Amino acid sequence: MDSKITRLSRAVINQAPVWVLFILGMWLVIIRPLGAQLALVPGDLGDARFNNYVLEQFFRWASGLTRDYWNATFYYPFQWTMAFSDNLLGSAPFYALFRWANLDQMSAFQGWYILGCCLNFAAAGIVLGRLKLKPLAVGAGAFFFTFGLPMLAQENHAQLLYHFCIPLACFSLWKFYQAPGLKWLAALAFWTVWQFYLTIYMGVFLLFLLAAFFILLPFWTPGQTFWQRLTAWPRCLIKAWLHANRTGRILAITAMVVLGLGLAGLLWPYFHVYRLYHFSRGWAEVSSMLPRLQSYLLADRSQIWPTASIASNLSLRHEHQLFPGLAVLVLVLAGIAGRFQTENRRLAWLHLGAALVLVILTLDIQGFSFYQWVWRIPGLNSIRSVTRIMLVVMWPLSVFIAWAVDGFIQQFSQQRRWMQAAVYLVIGLLVVESVFYNHKTYAKADSQARLDSLRQQIPESLPANPILFVGVSQQDSNPAREIDAMLLAQDLGWPVINGYSGNYPPGYNSPQSCKELPQLIKNYTDKNRTPSPTFNLELMKRVVPLGFDDCDPTGLGKTP
């Protein structure tokens, strides 16, 4: 027993760099910005609260408070509104656990956010540890993957937070190639499908990364003919099948079928919505969010690196904050220059090559981009913010910098100790870059005050089955006001004509006048070919308008 305790203590001590970097990141980068008593929520009053609404929709559905998950009642009476954007189904059960533990909506969102960071670090740390890298290297790679500057730049888009399946999927593909087995193929499918459930954006970009690995892996293998490289993957599949017993084959096939059906079940509502409303992104819209070379130098909210003067005329600049940090650049260059002859050398260079493939694929240079060919693939033209692919690129970069740190430690373990000190300084810079960052947060009290103010405007006399309709003045921040209406309606259990999402229903604009109500309803009836004017009239009678100064209650009973 004593020897087991001793071994456990020694293992914990040996892994101290990993734990130290995890604690520093969680406390200084994630929890500290939330303020005293966690009074602040990551993000702003717009997208962050929209994600909170989406998570709450799952909780209400799982708790039996809402019968129809996909038909969330914003943009009422339009249908399938949960498929207008990411749905977060893969992580929503975590949020529901916090709600079932009696946390309020915003506190549960904070718990969901913190847990996501823990899972990202754990997944990266586990994979890097399986590669037998030194603990300091594991900690550095996992820190960048979880708390790196590009990730912080997206903290307002909480739907992108959960990406812990990326390391696990890439590792499964690598293991399948190295030692073909159906279990690794099933694991690859499992982690990929779960990443789609976590966030479809990251699921699509993960497929890009896996495709890069798929192409590069055979050509990264020395001592093979060109034909052997072309047939590498079929040979892996055949070998995995022949080495499996009957039970293993049945389990693998069953798993693949179930996972395939699960992915189809997730994507079908989006296909249905596409057929109903023809959502897509034109090339002009997509090209504005393709990375430029300058994008990889931008970190405007960093307190250390002044980048405001770089590409000052770049449109949608907030989507182009892709600078990985000086520490990462130094480690990448050190790895390239050092060419450390360690066990994971080939794997590290494979990851760097895959990262370069994705960068080149999506880069816009003077209006030209290879990505235009990808954009033409059916379904992919709905992906707008291609700059977010950097969150996937962070994983191969994490592997490469972890290998570089490991190489330095191994090569200079007995001599030139100052080189090891230099590595510690660079990792210290990696931490400092993420710590000294201007975070976006909003106060719980401010959000609640907005909802309370709106709630106080509800009249005492209400129609049967009321529908909320909230005015948005020119002085209001449109997303914030629309989301006020959505959150209040969700709490009341009412439908609401207002809405905010990744897509808008046909003809929708934030209402500034009560006179816009008839046209908003008519947009629905025209689109859905509802012929009966009685339907429109009944809807009008149920509407409870708030925040307008031009509403005539008698006019709401007239046919639009």
Image: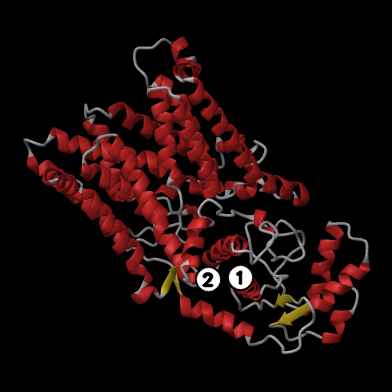
Given residues 479 and 8, the one toward you in this image is: 8
- 228 shown above or below 276: above
From the viewer's side, name the closer residue of 126 and 396. Answer: 126
Residue 399 picture location, percent across and down: 33, 38
| Quadrant location of the C terminus in the rendered image | bottom right
Identify the image quadrant of residue 178: top left
Q: Earlier in the sequence, mark 2 or mark 1?
A: 2
Q: Around disc 1, counting alpha carbons within 10 Å, would you say few (fewer than 14), some (14 to 19), or many (20 or more)?
A: many
Residue lying at 58% horizontally and 46% vertically, measured from the top left: 287
497 horizontally vs 18: left or right:
right
**Res 290 visible:** no
Residue 5, numbered circle: none
The image position of residue 57, as x and y in percent, is 60, 63
Res. 483 mark: 1
Which amino acid, by three-letter code, is at mark 1?
Ile
Q: Secondary structure at mark 2?
A: loop
Label at residue 45 = 2
Q: Residue at x 42, y 22 (%)?
A: 180
Badge 2 amino acid: Leu
Residue at image position (16%, 43%) is 4
Place residue 468 in its image quadrant.
Answer: bottom right
Secondary structure of residue under mark 1: helix
